[in-house]
């Protein structure tokens, strides 16, 4: 099983759609659905048994321990400091 965090955002949802379009193994998609997450991005997966969506925070305890991989798509804040800027 694959665990995807932030999978309802722009990049995460496109990864999920592409992953499942290739017939890959099932995945669990966790997203807080804050400003960047949107369930409409995943509407094409309605009824797809390989996709399990959980509205939640990856920081909460109790997520599945049997995941093979974890893929994270965290949305950046409204301002991102350039790492090359030493100030």
Image: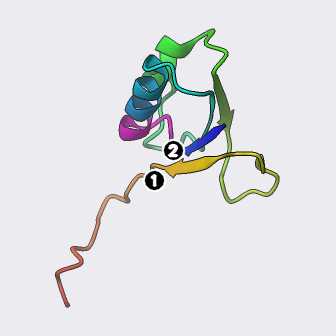
SS assignment at label 1? loop
* Callout 1 touching callout 2 (CB < 8 Å): yes
Quarter of the rendering containing residue 80: bottom left
Q: Which mark is residue 12?
A: none
Q: Is residue 83 above or below residue 57?
A: below
Q: Residue furthest bottom?
A: 87
Report the front residue among 58 and 49. 49
Residue at label 1? 74
Relative to residue 70, is residue 37 drawn left or right?
Answer: left
Residue at label 2? 6
Instruction: Mark 2: give few (<14), some (14-19) or many (20+) Cα within 10 Å.
Output: many
The answer to which of marks 1 and 2 sits earlier in the sequence is 2
Q: Residue furthest right?
A: 62
Q: Is residue 86 above or below residue 46?
A: below
Q: Residue furthest top?
A: 47
Report the front residue among 69 and 30. 69
Residue at 56% x, 46% y is 5
Residue at 68% x, 44% y is 56
Relative to residue 71, is residue 48 drawn left or right?
Answer: right
In magenta segment, residue 5: no
Residue at 51% x, 44% y is 6
Instruction: Mark 1: give few (<14), some (14-19) or many (20+) Cα within 10 Å.
Output: some
């Amino acid at each position: 099983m694959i665990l995807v965090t932030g999978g309802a955002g722009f990049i995460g949802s496109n990864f999920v759609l592409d992953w499942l379009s290739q017939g890959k193994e099932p995945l669990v998609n966790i997203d807080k659905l804050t400003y960047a997450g949107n369930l409409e991005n995943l509407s094409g997966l309605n009824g797809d048994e390989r996709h399990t969506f959980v509205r939640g925070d990856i920081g909460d305890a109790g997520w599945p321990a049997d995941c093979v991989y974890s893929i994270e798509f965290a949305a950046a804040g409204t301002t991102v400091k350039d790492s090359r800027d030493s100030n």
